[in-house]
Image (cartoon, helix red, strand yellow):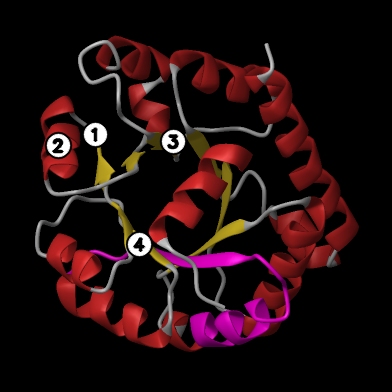
Amino acid sequence: MSFSKQEIISTIQNTGFVPLLSLGDAALACEAMHAAYQGGVRVFEYTNRHPNSFQVFKVLLAEAERLPGLMLGIGTVMDKATTMNYIGAGAHFIISPVINPDMAPVCHEYNKLWIPGCATLTEIVTARNLGADIIKLFPGSVLGPGFVSAILPVVPELKLMITGGVEPTEKSISAWFHAGAACVGLGSHLFTKEIFENRDWKALEARVRFVLEIIQAVKNT
């Protein structure tokens, strides 16, 4: 399956949620992705943090073909060469914890959504000027919702994805969306050690569904 940038942007905005999975076991990663999909997720990020991440990602891409409408991107990409490798493999979008201007033209050339990571208003405006449609605010735990509400009056058109500091609770998610976040990313708070130890995919599915329900409730208020 292939998706346009606008399709991915719209889906991210509509669901408001991107799970972030970091795992070196391809079989477990596929099961976790299935559970998240069953819970309602349609945009999924696998992070490039393991020696075999490229191989795991290719397995996930093949598995994603069996899940209609699932958009699978790669995260923790920080340079041009790695960007090109994952685009060549078939990644639907590219996410980075930093802003590297060398990545922008590659993503634009191949019409791939590029979501760079920023932590200051200067970085955010630089990313926007480089053509980023969605900007990752990282680390959210350091910046806080107050940072979002403070900068949006200056750059109100921004679409911000918050990661690193979001918890799967009504209090945490509500704070970010009320501040003006377009979406949130959840990693270790979603994919817990206990879930993988017990292979409790029903628990993961329920947790994903709970997060999506909170987001929709907040959006409707």
**Between 200 and 18, the one nearer to me in the picture:** 18
The percent coordinates of residue 43 (x first, y second) are: 58, 56
* Residue 119: mark: 1
Mark-to-mark CA distance, 2 and 3? 15 Å
Q: Is residue 211 above or below residue 171?
A: below
Q: Which residue type carries mark 2?
A: Glu
Q: Which residue is mark 4?
A: 76
The residue at the point 17 percent across, 64 percent down is 103
Of 44 and 186, nearer the camera is 44
Vertical order, 17 against 76 (above or below): above
| Mark 3 vs 4, N-terminal side | 4
**What x and y, as percent, mark residue 39?**
80, 52
Label whose residue precedes the other's in the sequence (3 or 1): 1
Residue at the disc numbered 3: 162
- Mark 4 or mark 1: whose residue is earlier in sequence: 4
**Residue where numbered disc 2 is placed:** 123
- State the residue at coordinates (85%, 46%): 206
Tell me what residue is drawn at x 65 percent, y 73 percent.
Answer: 29
Tell whether label 2 touches label 1 (CB within 8 Å): yes
Can residue 4 be seen from the camera position used here?
yes
